[in-house]
Image (cartoon, helix red, strand yellow):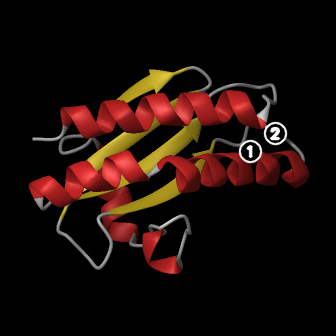
Amino acid sequence: MNTLCKAERLYSKIVIEKMFAGGASRSFSVFPLRAVYMSVDRQEVPASIISVPKKRFKRAVKRNRVKRQIREAYRKNKGGLWQALEEKEQGVAVAFIYLSNELFSSAEIENKVKILLARIAEKLE
């Protein structure tokens, strides 16, 4: 349960383009993160994610740190979202976008991801 396997990563260009084109997707922010999510057909896992910090950091080291923090926070706290999706027999694709120009601690990122995941779980149809 507390792993992040390859099936949970969002690779489908079609789904990603649909998500960011608007229309079917919804989003909200909890600074320094923004979640964009969209209902999708169920695959082998209930939720698939992509972590997308905009190119706010010039150095790849910092961008990779942010991606790692987001993925780790999601991995630890995905249980509530998965339960809500299992009950409703739905699937969801989620993108986390980093909005700040500064780095935050992993604990802060984890708190924000918890809030975002809880909000996504409660807003599912």
Q: Dot 2, how many residues are within 10 Å of its Cα: few (below 14), some (14-19), or many (20+)? A: some
User: How far is disc 2 from disc 1 in space, using C-alphas?
Assistant: 10 Å
Q: Earlier in the sequence, mark 2 or mark 1?
A: 2
Q: From the top left corner, tell me how far across and down residue 119 is, in percent.
A: 33, 30
- The answer to whether residue 20 is visible is no
Residue lying at 11% horizontally and 54% vertically, measured from the top left: 88
Image quarter (top left, top right, bottom left or bottom right) of the C terminus: top left
In depth, the one of 18 and 110 nearer the eye is: 110
Q: Quadrant of residue 17?
A: bottom left
Q: Is residue 40 left or right of residue 78?
A: left
Residue type at the position of mark 2: Phe
Q: Tag on residue 107? A: none
Q: Quadrant of residue 32?
A: top right
Does 75 sit above or below residue 37?
Answer: below
Q: Is residue 35 left or right of residue 98?
A: left
On the image, numbered disc 1 is attached to which residue? 66
> What element does badge 1 sit on?
helix
Q: From the top left corner, tell me how far across and down residue 78 is, in percent.
A: 44, 51
Residue lying at 50% horizontally and 21% vertically, measured from the top left: 30
Residue lying at 45% horizontally and 28% vertically, measured from the top left: 115
Q: Are marks 2 and 1 in contact (CB under 8 Å)?
A: yes
Residue lying at 40% horizontally and 69% vertically, measured from the top left: 13
Q: From the top left corner, tell me how far across and down residue 16 is, in percent.
A: 38, 59
On the image, numbered disc 2 is attached to which residue? 57
